Image: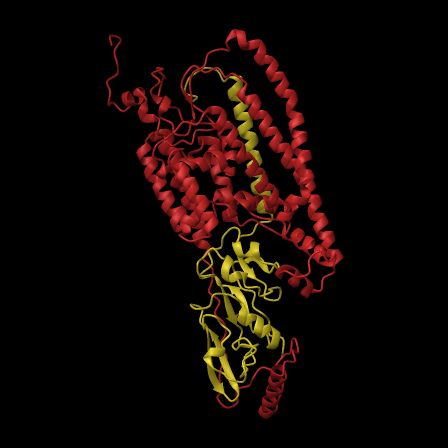
Chain colours: A red, B yellow
């Protein structure tokens, strides 16, 4: 028996050595008659315990609750800052920034469009909890829980003011980013937000050079412009903005009444404090009305144009999907445009699948990008149009107020308000004589 | 704030209504996602039967030391004297260290009995380049193959290697069955 197996192995080996590739030759497994050697089995170390995932969810819940309390009730910037540091260490450096609520958006989208993918419970909790809290307390998640916000908040050295129109225009990036992230997640092409997460490589202390440079740039800009990622890029922030508009409670700069002292005007590094405004100047009123009418009429045009353009670019956008890239590669190989093969095309040919099948699959994905492109483009058009309209609407305001949408609830403005000092009894209540 | 005693304005009513709508919306998202509920987490794993052993695993992982390592499934291994995963194919019948295929010398070769040798992976040295996987699959039984090692893997939401995988071998698998080992089918 042993002799036979020895001979077969020897024969097979000599065949290989003669250069005759036999392909998938199966050698019989040895039976160790002499030594009774026991075959080891490979180790299979387990992933991180699920329990820790639930601990993360509980910590998130606690941090959100505490953040809301510290911002809205305690009104203490120092306490918010300490909580922010904790979140940076826990969600950032300890949990290494993954999974985060920003990225979890894509998991939820993918689970809606891909019947085979189900969101793990904890990822769903990470997506929903900050939204829920924002709906009631404003963006307290951004203030002290999000590690990406925290790392930028820490490096802010000297704030520069960004003009309102520039801020509004730059924020369009975030809407486009959200739209693109949803489009690519829904089609199963890529998780864009994770791929270009600028700070995760800092949290892990390792990562690709490109992303490291990207994060470095954001931090460099963040020295002078408060939280550039949060304000102009963060796709989750876009959702939070809208929910924050209708939040039940909100950051109020003054604890009781605004005395129009203008002291808070420069307090906000994120350009979220709105000054009081009276009614439209009468001479501009007619012109403004006409402009508004034009902009409202322009809205559907922008949406259609956006949809038409992005769906027209489906051949390009669809290349984000690996199957489409593979199909194009195989096509150019088949038509003789290229002579060599890639890893992907070689792997595909090794499976023996029919090429037509691949082409059909790629066509199906392109169709998805056609429909998705219409929706994405219309969304971007809608946002751009609404932004134009918002810039030309005059909002009447009697006091200095934190913008519901833009306020990141960091609590910096509180101590600028003299009424706050009265509340904290650092200042005597002024009498009528003063 | 709603401490003041003035009657609820139109704006507040609208906001309350919208907030209610959003709550229902979030509830629907939660409900539909919970409908397909998956209680355990998902982790990344390589299907060894789809893997093209291209070598991307060694370079694309966000970790400096890739989380992908070679696994030796001993029950498939033929314990070859001249292991095509261990030696360069051009090497003459000279089992010497200079003829090793592995760039980091992560495979140890141990004599068991004539003519069988056991090959073990030293994970600390293995970089997941799949050179041995290719050799073993081409001329041997294919007992060497790549797996994501979960004591190292960070379980990124989007795996950087999965995005670079040419054969679509990366899959999300439930965390309670985190490995896709080959099956022994010779018996």
Left or right: where A341 falls relative to A32: right
Q: Nearer the viewer, residue A306 or A105?
A: A306
Image-quadrant location for residue A428: top left
For image coordinates 40% across by 39% down, the residue present is: A220
Image-quadrant location for residue A356: bottom right
* Quarter of the figure with the C terminus of chain A: top left
The mark tally for this picture is 0
For image coordinates 60% across by 74% down, the residue present is: B184
Question: Is residue A15 at all visible to an observer of this figure?
Answer: yes
Q: Position of residue B109 (x, y in %)?
A: 47, 80
Q: Nearer the viewer, residue A305 or A365?
A: A305
Q: Image height check: is A45 above or below A112?
A: below
Q: Position of residue B57 (x, y in %)?
A: 52, 61
In the rendered image, the residue lying farthest to the right is A356
Q: Image height check: is B4 above or below B129?
A: above
Q: Position of residue A78 (x, y in %)?
A: 30, 34
For image coordinates 38% across by 41% down, the residue present is: A151
Q: Position of residue B102 (x, y in %)?
A: 49, 72
* Quarter of the figure with the N terminus of chain A: bottom right
Question: Is residue A57 at all visible to an observer of this figure?
Answer: no
For image coordinates 48% across by 40% down, the residue present is: A129
């Amino acid at each position: 028996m042993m002799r036979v197996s020895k001979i077969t192995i020897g024969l097979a080996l000599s065949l290989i050595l003669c250069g005759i590739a036999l392909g998938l030759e199966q050698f019989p497994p040895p039976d160790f008659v002499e030594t009774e050697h026991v075959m080891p089995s490979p180790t299979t170390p387990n992933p991180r315990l699920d329990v820790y995932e639930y601990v993360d969810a509980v910590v998130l819940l606690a941090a959100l609750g505490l953040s809301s309390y510290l911002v809205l009730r305690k009104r203490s910037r120092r306490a918010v800052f300490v909580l922010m540091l904790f979140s940076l260490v826990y969600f950032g450096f300890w949990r290494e920034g993954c999974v985060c609520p920003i990225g979890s958006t894509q998991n939820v989208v993918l689970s809606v469009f891909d019947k085979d993918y189900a969101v793990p419970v904890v990822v769903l909790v990470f997506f929903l909890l900050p939204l829920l809290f924002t709906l009631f307390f404003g963006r307290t998640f951004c203030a002290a829980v999000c590690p990406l916000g925290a790392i930028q908040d820490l490096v802010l050295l000297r704030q520069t003011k960004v003009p309102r129109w520039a801020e509004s225009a730059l924020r369009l990036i975030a809407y486009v980013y959200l739209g693109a992230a949803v489009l690519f997640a829904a089609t199963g092409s890529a998780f864009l937000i994770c791929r270009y997460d600028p700070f995760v490589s800092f949290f892990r202390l390792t990562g690709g050079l490109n992303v490291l440079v990207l994060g470095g740039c954001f931090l460099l800009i963040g020295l002078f412009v408060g939280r550039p990622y949060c304000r102009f890029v963060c796709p989750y922030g876009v959702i939070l903005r809208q929910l924050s508009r209708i939040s039940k409670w909100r950051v109020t700069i003054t604890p009781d009444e605004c005395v129009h002292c203008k002291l808070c005007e420069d307090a906000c590094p994120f350009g979220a404090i709105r000054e009081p405004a009276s009614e439209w100047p009468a001479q501009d009123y007619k012109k403004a009305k006409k402009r508004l009418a034009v902009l409202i009429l322009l809205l559907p045009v922008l949406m259609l144009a956006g949809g038409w353009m992005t769906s027209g670019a489906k051949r390009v956008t669809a290349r984000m999907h690996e199957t489409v890239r593979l199909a194009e590669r195989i096509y150019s190989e088949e038509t003789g445009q290229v002579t060599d093969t890639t890893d992907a095309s070689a792997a595909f040919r090794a499976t023996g699948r029919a090429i037509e099948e691949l082409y059909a699959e790629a066509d199906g994905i392109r169709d998805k990008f056609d429909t998705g492109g219409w929706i994405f483009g219309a969304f971007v058009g809608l946002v751009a149009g609404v932004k134009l309209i918002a810039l030309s609407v005059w909002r009447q305001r009697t006091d200095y107020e934190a913008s519901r949408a833009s306020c990141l609830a960091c609590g910096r403005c509180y101590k600028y308000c003299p009424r706050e000092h009265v509340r904290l009894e650092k200042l005597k209540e002024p009498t009528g004589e003063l | 704030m709603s401490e003041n005693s003035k009657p609820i304005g139109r704006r507040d009513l609208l906001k309350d209504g919208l907030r209610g709508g959003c709550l229902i919306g979030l509830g629907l998202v939660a409900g539909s996602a919970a409908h397909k509920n998956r209680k355990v987490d998902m982790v990344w794993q390589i299907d060894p039967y789809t893997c093209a052993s291209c070598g991307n695993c060694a370079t694309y992982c966000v970790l400096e030391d890739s989380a992908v390592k070679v696994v030796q499934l001993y029950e498939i291994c033929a314990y070859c004297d001249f292991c095509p995963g261990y030696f360069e194919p051009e090497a003459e019948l000279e089992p010497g260290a200079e003829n090793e295929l592995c760039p980091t010398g992560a495979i140890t070769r141990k004599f068991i009995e004539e003519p069988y040798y056991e090959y073990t992976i030293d994970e600390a040295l293995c970089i997941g380049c799949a050179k041995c996987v290719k050799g073993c699959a081409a001329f041997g039984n294919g007992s060497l193959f790549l797996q994501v090692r979960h004591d190292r893997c960070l379980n990124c939401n989007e795996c950087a290697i999965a995005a670079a995988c040419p054969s679509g071998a990366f899959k999300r698998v439930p965390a309670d069955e985190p490995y896709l080992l080959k099956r022994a089918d010779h018996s």
